[in-house]
Amino acid sequence: MVSTIIGNRLSLFEPQLSAAARMDPSERKGLAVQGMARTEPLSTLATKHVVSRKFVYEQIDKAEQALDEVFSPPPKDDRVLFSIPVTKDWLQQVVLSTILHCHGSYQGVKDFLHDTFDLEISIGTIHNIVTASVEKARLVNRQEDLRGIKVGAQDEIFQGDPVLVGVDPFSTYCYLLVQEPSRDGTTWGVHLLDLSERGLSLNYTIADAGKGLRAGQAEAWPTVPCRGDVFHAERDMGNMATYLENRAYGCIGAREKLERKMDRARKKSEGQSFSTKLAIARAEETSAIQLADDMRLLAQWMREDVLSLEGPDAPTRRALFDFIAQEMRAREHLAPHRIRPVRIALENQRDELLAFAEDIDRQFVAIAQQHHVSLKDVRKVFELSCFAPVDSLYWQKDSALWKRLGSLYPVVRKAVQQVAETTVRASSMVENLNSRLRCYFFLRREVGPDYLELLRFFLNHRRFPRSRKAERAERSPAEILNGKSFPHWLEQLGYTRFQKAA
């Protein structure tokens, strides 16, 4: 009997849904995946899920459409974002930007304009554009104000003829970039005197042991001290220690090889033929390992205790320096070709390398006198920077200084921090500049040495897109040095930059 119940009464008859209709989306997706995988016949798959083969084909077709949609290439976007008025002035800016920003060659610029703009331009035209910009850059360079530079890092870079380089380590402003056939004292002296006439007056310079550079500065700037560059001293000691470590590993390998030969010889009762060689190899191994360990330790002391920014006063550093040199002398007979040149170079440059420590001592004495605190407490504030804030010892020392100095502690700490930030020990900035210059020097063959005028202008007026130091970001070295804004480097060359419409 079939009856229909009205209201809250249940029907005795309810229509039954098919298996396909009862499947939820996740089950349909799983069925489609199994069907696409073809791990079993579709008829078997349909029987297992109590559906028709037609239904299985429909699910497979939906899955394939979804995959095609996901993995199909994006539609070509031919929308015009904005229009550029291609003028002769604009093309000249493209040429200069491609050369200076992208380190492009003349042929590379020519090919770029042909491929992207369908424009034919001769290499001679590119040369004329660059040459005209060199003259404009020279005029801007001659108007520069060098009075704000108080420390100079100077060096020489070799690309054929030497290139003399000078840079301000704080603003990274390059005040000297010229190519000369010689790097003797006279050549350096002429350029340094010219810089003096243009307003450059330095407190001190940082340089390596180059004789011509130092002789030229002594003649041109007799009252300006030339401090030693700790980078080269640390590098030379590190290279020496690495060489001795590699030699020690070689001795270990030679001893192990002899031991293997001796083991094979013992099986034939011929072990005595290697006993003398093995004894000598073991003795050489022991000596080489001990020497490598000693020199690595001396190099670490020199780097972390003597030439580091944070450390003892100048007399203590000088005593440690002499001790390290003495220990090197005592061992140099074990590797004279490696140890002796480094030791002699260190001894000859000791006073120049430690000049920064004497300057720090003088400034600390002035801080102690100005704030009426003991010199010992000033040095303790300085030593606090050796510890990381995550170290519990840092906070113990910090608390002790608060108790001893009271409200003077923040003032003294700020003054000490200023000394640390303005003390230059190495010509790292000029070394960094040299590495950047090498990417450009191949162009000098086409433009000549005058190209360096344009390059110096570009490096000084190109704004840093980013920097670990917030005060440098989005500013050029010239803006950092002078504390004011300058037009974009292309605008200083007389060009009108393209601006998109709002």
Image (cartoon, grey):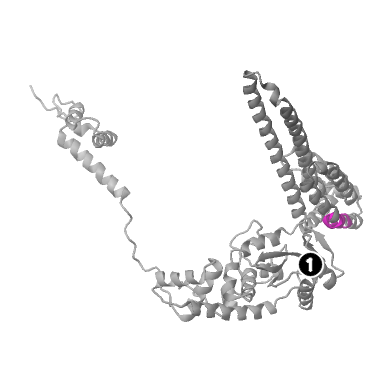
Q: Is residue 471 shown to the viewer in this render?
A: no
Q: Main secondary structure of the magenta part?
A: helix
Magenta segment boundaries in residue numbering: 349-363
**Residue at 73% in and 51% down:** 235
Residue 163 placement (x, y as % from top left): 69, 69
Q: How many discs mark residues in the rendered view?
A: 1
Taking the image as shown, residue 327 lies to the left or right of residue 478, namely: right
Q: Amino acid at mark 1?
A: Gly
Q: Is residue 445 shown to the viewer in this render?
A: yes
Frontmost residue, 231 versus 159: 159
**Crowd band around label 1 with a 10 angstrom C-alpha radius: few (<14), some (14–19), many (20+):** some
Residue 353 belongs to magenta span: yes
**Residue at 57% in and 77% down:** 491
Residue 148 belongs to magenta span: no
Frontmost residue, 308 versus 221: 221
Residue 394 placement (x, y as % from top left): 77, 41
Taking the image as shown, residue 149 lies to the left or right of residue 351, namely: left
User: What residue is shown with label 1?
Assistant: 212
Is 275 situated above or below 297? above
Quarter of the figure with residue 27:
top left
Residue 339 placement (x, y as % from top left): 79, 47
Is 441 situated above or below 121? above
